[in-house]
Image (cartoon, coloured by chain):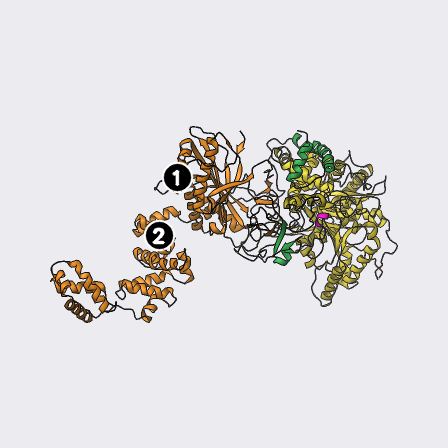
Chain colours: A orange, B green, C yellow
């Protein structure tokens, strides 16, 4: 029976009962260098079309590439962070194929001599267990230009009458990170895929080599998948699903392809070796290009570039620049800060670990830092439609020092919590530092015990029934009296102190 | 060495994106056959265990600092374009996604 | 003083310009007049830039009159092979596919000529993309040999050799991938040097075979070649393969012309059988002149040179097939729509353009290179050729242990008639048998006239090869030989060439 490419799917449980998935992930990361891989053109995202181009990245006749030294260093640091070996000597190679967005009609890449190889990344799964993802290689290459397809109904390639090409992206440094075929993930294959990409993203962020924005395409993932009938060890035919560009999609795409392969194999069919396109909206993949002998890339060593031969001293000095691995750092911080698992997860999901770290460093308590960043500031950011608290704060010049200052105002007794919230509002509205806002708004706890005692006496007198309950031992009834006192004091009293005075008057 | 057939040449022309006419194909099969026979001499040389040489000079580690240089500017970049539109290179419709 | 400016050497012109004996405008005008008179027959130029050359000349004359310190060659005009990108001047590489292309940038070599204040007269004819030994493969018609207009001027740089041989320019830039400077020099009675690979920047040289290409001087005297070599050469950060060292002391070596005690190695594999009798006779005489000048002769053997032609005709087409992929009708140059196809795709337009825009020889080599790199044949062809290349480099290394320079006839024959070899690619390729090994190993080589062959009265060439970065030795040997030959001939060989025009301009 010939190879098939249907869209039928098999139920998840049936797939797992009959097959073991084999997963492979290829991640392309755009480096955050100032300039392109082989020329000095800028790499700003979103620049006007064809304004960041030169003879080299336009592939003009006669132009020659020269390697960006920071790109090589970044590649080596990525390799080291992935526990890879770093090549003693390696070359670039030309991958020859024609495509209008590729100016030279070959991609300068690496072939059988990658800069980094044979590594691994330990990935933590939701249940706390660890899955080791073996890394086959990480190599350097260049990005292509971007095409705008015109004349079709949907801006898609099919049905377009012509395309408009912008080469600003052509030549931006890419690192391609390729895993070995991952076996044994079983039903957790979709989760492993997502967790791997997430862990890799955090690692690259910690390395400060890329902004790893999947939505902007600075990190792109291709998912290779095949199924092996249970009890066998021969790899099945794989499909390569391209451009799966969110963590959630990575998980969904693996699951979908497992079910699709399962349906074909269960019927006795065989898988067509092809690329598949992932559709975020419908959650399915569709048939792309069939792999054929036309994919003869005729790789050969790039004669215009000389070999890269990093000395061991260079490699070790780059190793010394590696940050603490994110997973290890998280564990250490959670223990240092005394956060519960839930608190830590919330902080992680909100992307607040670094801010809290800086705030604690600046002198705040971990609990205080967490409370304000993930409380008032995050709420306000969300209310204004921002999902990224850190950039929201940065745009408004809110710094860890502000949090430290505010916490100081509370612990010194000048402000209570509700006043502190008012202060945040002012700070976020751009009214100045916490102290300045408190001063301007006249926020200060009344420190005069006489006024507070007078207010307490008035409230007790006005609420004899409640006062009696307290006298009878129902201490929690004091809450109502405290509320009244705070109201009488227009909020500018220390509620704790009011409680102290009330209880002293009624229970002693 | 396998004989180069007309189909082989047609396949190679496809890889090289050259739309050879039938007459060109016919002629090239013969010419390439002669050339290939003579260049096959390399296989008879004492190359066993010899390290292939891709670069004539033993230079390594040539890089440039990550410093921005001026770009051409869109006008100069597009100056040779057969067609352009919206400050982009206009190319005929593309058949396949990459 | 009555001097024919067109017949003066560049060194003589430089002296005249410095002393005020002439102006750059006068010299440039004389060259342009000569071109007007003879280039209708010779067809050395594809493009003459009258206005640009005169304007540069005026500029230099003004600067000189202001007492500005100028480069020694300032004001001496030069012709540039059409394979070098020249900003604002058409650059076609002798191909239809680049017809009308005007580069937006200058090759490094061209920038250096401009910095030195050398007016650029125009762009010289060549075999398409430098593939050929006769200029018969130029899409714009062949260049004719000034010694006999029915014969080839050599190739690929026939335009550059003919332009100096016909006194249209004192200097020209050539490029040499397998002999394209040296073989045309040999058959036109001129001097040409292929510097050490990496000695002259390739940035802006439209690549034929990146690991073989090298630009160099085409002149009428050895000293002129040295002067031009010095202007062109030196490190360029835009070319990764550029040697980061000063230009070897070529001018000093040419002036000293001292071969006392030098060991001259005759390469057994590059003499005797297969070489025209008259060519061999002039070679033997030249060797005797060097012995008379104090050199010692040794015989060396380079057994792998017998496979050099085969290795070359695999490595060159392989690299060329990739280098020429960029000519695809998308970004610059010719765009041809396929006949009888409605709404053609980019792929079809690429294929139609490449068929229409490339000549037969270019297509032949692209297909050959595509084959040599293709999956399943790489090891047998490209891989084996690279191993032979290593053997050839090893042979050179061994030979240079017993000889300071190696010598041979430059080309096996004198200039052949148009059409003699055009239909027999292998016969054409054999012209380069003696020049190719230097390109494969990256070592420098020079050709200078050794006299006229008895049987046809046409010029023969004497080739000198030196170890990498020892380019100065070529000039020491070349200048010593030139002195003795000029003495024997009673003047330069070109004085015996037919006068192409009766209207040759005489300078005052």
Image-based side of C266 in relation to A325, left or right: right
Q: Position of residue C272 (x, y in %)?
A: 77, 34
Among the 4 quarters of the image, the one containing residue C306 = top right
Foreground: B89 or A307?
A: B89
- Would residue A194 be visible to someone looking at this image? yes
Residue A347, numbered circle: 2
The chain carrying label 1 is: A
Among the 4 quarters of the image, the one containing residue A19 = top left
Q: Position of residue A45 (x, y in %)?
A: 52, 55
Among the 4 quarters of the image, the one containing residue A457 = bottom left
The 10 Å Cα crowd at callout 2, few under 14, some 14 to 19, many 20 or more, is: some
- Height in image: A284 above or below C101? above
Specify the segment rendered in magenta: C83-102
**Residue of label 1:** A131
Image-based side of C113 in relation to A229, left or right: right
Foreground: C438 or C337?
A: C337
The 10 Å Cα crowd at callout 1, few under 14, some 14 to 19, many 20 or more, is: some
Residue A384 colored in magenta in the image: no
Q: Helix, strand, or loop for circle 2?
A: helix
Residue C84 colored in magenta in the image: yes
In this view, which residue lies farthest toward the right?
Answer: C502
How many numbered marks does the figure carry? 2
In terms of sequence position, does the residue under pointer 1 or pointer 2 come before the other?
Answer: 1
């Amino acid at each position: 029976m010939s190879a098939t490419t249907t869209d039928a799917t098999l139920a998840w449980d049936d797939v797992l009962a009959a097959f073991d998935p084999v997963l492979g992930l290829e991640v392309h990361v755009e480096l955050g260098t100032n300039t392109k891989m082989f020329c000095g053109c800028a790499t700003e995202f979103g620049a006007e079309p064809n304004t960041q181009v030169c003879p080299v990245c336009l592939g003009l006749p006669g132009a020659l590439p020269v390697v960006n030294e920071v790109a090589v260093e970044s590649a080596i640091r990525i390799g080291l962070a992935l526990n890879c070996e770093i090549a003693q000597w390696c070359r670039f190679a030309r991958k020859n194929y024609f495509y209008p967005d590729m100016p030279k009609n070959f991609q300068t890449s690496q072939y059988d001599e990658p800069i980094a190889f044979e590594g691994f990344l330990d990935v933590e799964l939701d249940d706390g267990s660890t899955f080791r993802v073996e890394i086959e290689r990480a190599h350097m290459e260049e990005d292509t230009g971007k095409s705008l397809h015109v004349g079709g109904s949907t801006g898609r390639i099919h049905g377009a009458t012509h395309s408009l090409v912008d080469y600003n992206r052509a030549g931006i440094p890419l690192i391609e990170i390729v895993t070995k075929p991952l076996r044994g993930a079983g039903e957790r294959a979709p989760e492993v895929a997502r967790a791997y990409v997430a862990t890799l993203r955090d690692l690259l962020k910690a390395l400060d080599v890329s902004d790893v924005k999947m939505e902007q395409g600075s990190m792109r993932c291709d998912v290779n998948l095949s199924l092996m009938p249970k009890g066998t060890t021969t790899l099945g035919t794989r499909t390569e699903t391209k451009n799966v560009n969110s963590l959630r999609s990575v998980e969904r795409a693996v699951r979908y392809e497992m079910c699709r392969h399962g349906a074909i194999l269960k019927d006795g069919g065989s898988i067509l070796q092809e690329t598949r396109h992932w559709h975020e909206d419908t959650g399915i993949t569709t048939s792309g290009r069939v792999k054929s002998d036309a994919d003869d890339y005729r790789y050969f060593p790039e004669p215009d570039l000389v070999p890269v031969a990093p000395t061991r001293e260079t490699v070790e000095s780059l190793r010394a620049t590696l940050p603490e691995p994110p997973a290890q750092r998280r564990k250490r911080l959670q223990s240092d800060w005394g956060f519960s698992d839930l608190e830590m997860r919330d902080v992680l999901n909100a992307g607040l670990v670094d801010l809290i770290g800086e705030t604690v460093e600046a002198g705040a308590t971990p609990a205080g830092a967490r409370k304000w960043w993930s409380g008032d500031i995050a709420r306000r950011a969300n209310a204004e439609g921002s999902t990224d608290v850190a950039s929201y704060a940065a745009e408004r010049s809110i710094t860890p020092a502000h949090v430290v200052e505010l916490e100081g105002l509370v612990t010194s007794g000048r402000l209570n919590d509700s006043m502190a919230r008012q202060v945040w509002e002012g700070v976020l509205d751009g009214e100045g530092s916490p102290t300045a806002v408190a001063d301007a708004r006249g926020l200060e706890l009344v420190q005069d015990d006489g006024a507070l005692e007078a207010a307490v006496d008035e409230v007790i007198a006005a609420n004899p029934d409640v006062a009696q309950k307290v006298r009878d031992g129902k201490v929690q009834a004091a809450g109502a009296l405290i509320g009244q006192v705070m109201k009488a004091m227009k909020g500018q009293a220390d509620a704790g102190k009011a409680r102290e005075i009330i209880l002293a008057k009624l229970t002693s | 060495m396998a004989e180069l057939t007309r189909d082989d040449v047609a396949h190679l022309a496809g890889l090289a994106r050259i739309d050879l006419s039938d007459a060109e194909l016919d002629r090239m099969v013969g010419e390439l056959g002669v050339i290939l026979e003579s260049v096959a001499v390399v296989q008879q040389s004492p190359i066993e265990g010899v390290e292939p040489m891709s670069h004539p000079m033993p230079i390594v580690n040539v890089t440039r600092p990550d410093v921005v240089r001026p770009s051409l500017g869109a006008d100069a970049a597009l100056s040779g374009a057969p067609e352009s539109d919206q400050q982009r290179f206009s190319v005929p419709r593309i058949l396949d996604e990459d | 003083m009555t001097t024919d400016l067109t017949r003066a050497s560049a060194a003589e012109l430089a002296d005249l310009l410095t002393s005020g004996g002439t102006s750059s405008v006068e010299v440039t005008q004389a060259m342009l007049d000569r071109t007007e008179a003879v280039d209708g027959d010779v067809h050395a130029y594809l493009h003459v830039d009258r206005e640009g050359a005169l304007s540069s000349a005026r500029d230099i004359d003004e600067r000189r009159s202001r007492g500005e310190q100028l480069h020694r060659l300032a004001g001496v005009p030069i012709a540039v092979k059409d394979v070098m990108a020249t900003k604002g001047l058409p650059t076609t590489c002798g191909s239809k596919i680049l017809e009308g292309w005007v580069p937006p940038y200058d090759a490094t070599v061209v920038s250096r000529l401009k910095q030195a204040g050398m007016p650029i007269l125009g762009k010289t004819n060549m075999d398409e993309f430098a593939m050929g030994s006769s200029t018969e493969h130029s899409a714009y018609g062949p260049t004719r040999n000034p010694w006999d207009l029915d014969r080839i001027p050599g190739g690929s740089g026939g335009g550059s050799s003919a332009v100096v041989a016909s006194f249209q320019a004192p200097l020209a830039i050539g490029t040499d991938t397998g002999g394209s400077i040296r073989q045309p020099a040999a058959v036109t009675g001129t001097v040409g040097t292929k510097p050490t690979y990496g000695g002259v920047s390739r940035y802006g040289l439209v690549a034929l075979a990146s690991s073989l290409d090298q630009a160099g001087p085409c002149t009428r005297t050895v000293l002129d070649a040295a002067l031009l070599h010095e202007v062109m050469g030196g490190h360029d950060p835009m070319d990764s393969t550029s040697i980061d060292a000063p230009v070897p002391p070529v001018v000093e070596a040419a002036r000293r012309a001292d071969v006392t005690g030098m060991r001259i190695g005759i390469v057994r594999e590059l003499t005797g059988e297969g070489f025209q009798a008259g060519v061999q006779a002039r070679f033997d005489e030249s060797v005797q002149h060097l012995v008379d000048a104090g050199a010692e002769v040794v015989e060396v053997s380079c057994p792998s040179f017998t496979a050099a032609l085969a290795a070359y005709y695999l490595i060159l087409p392989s690299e060329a097939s990739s280098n020429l992929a960029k000519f695809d009708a998308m970004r610059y140059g010719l765009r041809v729509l396929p006949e009888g196809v409605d709404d053609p795709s980019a792929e079809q337009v690429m294929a139609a353009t490449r068929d229409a825009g490339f000549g037969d020889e270019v297509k032949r080599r692209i297909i050959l290179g595509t084959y040599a790199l293709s999956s399943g044949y790489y090891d047998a062809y490209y891989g084996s050729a690279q191993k032979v290349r290593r053997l050839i480099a090893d042979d050179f290394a061994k030979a240079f242990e017993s000889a300071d320079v190696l010598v041979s006839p430059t080309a096996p024959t004198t200039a052949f008639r148009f059409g003699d070899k055009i239909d027999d690619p292998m016969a054409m390729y054999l012209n380069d048998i003696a020049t190719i090994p230097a390109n494969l190993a990256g070592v420098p080589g020079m050709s200078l006239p050794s006299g006229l062959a008895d049987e046809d009265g046409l010029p023969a060439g004497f080739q000198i090869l030196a170890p990498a970065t020892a380019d100065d030795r070529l000039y020491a040997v070349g200048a010593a030989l030139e002195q003795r030959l000029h003495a024997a001939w009673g003047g330069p060989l070109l004085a015996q060439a037919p006068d192409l025009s009766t209207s040759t301009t005489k300078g005052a």
